[in-house]
């Protein structure tokens, strides 16, 4: 697997090495994302070992990620800027539409391209130290890593525009209120919680996870009539898998867990 950076690591964890833990490992620069790191992230997802069933992304040090490495933003002309943004799009597409569901474990700064990366993940878990911002607005630039597509789908275009117009920083509790993350957890526990969730996700039938990653976002963008039809097709395919039949039988014969509120 050609990895272009030593600033990111992949380790396989879980009882059957079914969880890929991806660590942004450039704490001295607050895990700022340079080109090598972005390409290495892409390579990790493209070359994911076949036994992996879920992934977790987190950052080492005090912060998840300070966004684009601004020291590389020097003399790009318009064409180079276009290709640079498209390179980010391709890499983050490998995260969102890749082989396995991805849980982001967030703490400290989740800013600029760091928020764009977090937005490409399927679940965001953040601890009390996390804060969220889009400093592109005040740096005289624009998001380029897919943020203008993904972030409004989480919090709405008006809130994203406010973050960029005014430099608004959302602390953890307010970020949860507006939908930037699904889980808010005590300081220092985001990675543990993300691992717990990834372990549960890894235990699902693979075709159900595939449908959630690849069918649900498409259905959500379709007109209702087409969405209902796509849903019926996907439901039929997923339920026909032998694993689905075995799981339903397990429940009917008392071997599977009930839904419980505790
Ligand atoms: C960096 C970067 C970076 C830190 N590129 N070098 N992102 C930003 O505009 C955010 C800029 N960063 C910050 O606001 C702060 O660094 C943090 C709030 C994230 C963290 O603060 P702190 O006090 O813990 O760290 P620091 O002292 O500011 O930074 C430590 C070092 O990391 C320092 O370098 P040093 O050599 O002086 O030690 C910083 O220069 C360096 N550093 N952040 C480069 N981002 C696809 S388009 C996406 C567009 C964007 O993401 S724009 C938003 C960029």
Image: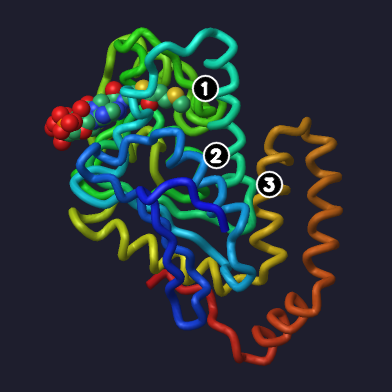
CB within 8 Å, label 1 to label 3: no
Pointer 1: what residue?
Answer: 148
Quarter of the picture holding the C terminus: bottom left
Q: Which mark is residue 216?
A: 3
Disc 3, SS? helix
Give the number of the mark in front: 1 or 2: 2
Question: Taking the image as four quarters, which one is ligand 1 found in?
Answer: top left
Q: CA separation, marks 1 and 2? A: 13 Å
Q: Residue at x 42, y 66 (%)?
A: 11
* Precedes in sequence: disc 1 or disc 2: 2
Q: Which mark is residue 92?
A: 2
Give the number of the mark in front: 3 or 2: 2
Q: Would you say 4 lies left or right of 262 here?
A: right
* Precedes in sequence: disc 3 or disc 2: 2
Q: Dot 3, how many residues are within 10 Å of its Cα: few (below 14), some (14-19), or many (20+)?
A: some
Q: CA separation, marks 3 and 2? A: 18 Å
């Amino acid at each position: 697997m050609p990895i272009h950076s030593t600033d990111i690591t992949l380790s396989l964890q879980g009882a059957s090495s079914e969880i890929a833990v991806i660590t942004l490992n450039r704490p001295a620069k607050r895990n700022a994302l340079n080109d090598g790191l972005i390409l290495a992230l892409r390579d990790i997802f493209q070359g994911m070992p076949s036994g992996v069933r879920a992934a977790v992304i987190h950052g080492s040090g005090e912060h998840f990620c300070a966004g684009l490495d601004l020291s590389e933003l020097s003399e790009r002309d318009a064409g180079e800027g276009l290709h640079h943004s498209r390179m980010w799009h391709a890499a983050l597409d490998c995260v969102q539409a890749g082989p396995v569901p991805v849980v982001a474990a967030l703490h400290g700064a989740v800013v600029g391209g760091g928020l764009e990366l977090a937005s490409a993940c399927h679940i965001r878990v953040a601890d009390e130290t996390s804060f969220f911002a889009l400093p592109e607005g005040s740096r005289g630039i624009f998001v380029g890593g897919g943020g203008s597509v993904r972030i409004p789908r989480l919090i709405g275009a008006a809130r994203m525009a406010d973050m960029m117009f005014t430099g608004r920083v959302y602390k953890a509790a307010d970020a949860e209120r507006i939908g930037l993350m699904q889980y808010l957890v005590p300081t220092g526990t985001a990675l543990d919680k993300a691992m717990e969730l990834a372990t549960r996700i890894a235990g699902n039938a693979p075709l159900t996870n595939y449908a959630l990653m690849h069918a649900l976002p498409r259905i959500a963008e379709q007109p209702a009539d087409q969405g209902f039809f796509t849903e019926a097709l996907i439901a039929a395919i997923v339920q026909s898998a032998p694993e689905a039949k075995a799981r339903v039988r397990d429940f009917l014969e008392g071997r599977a867990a009930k839904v419980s509120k505790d």
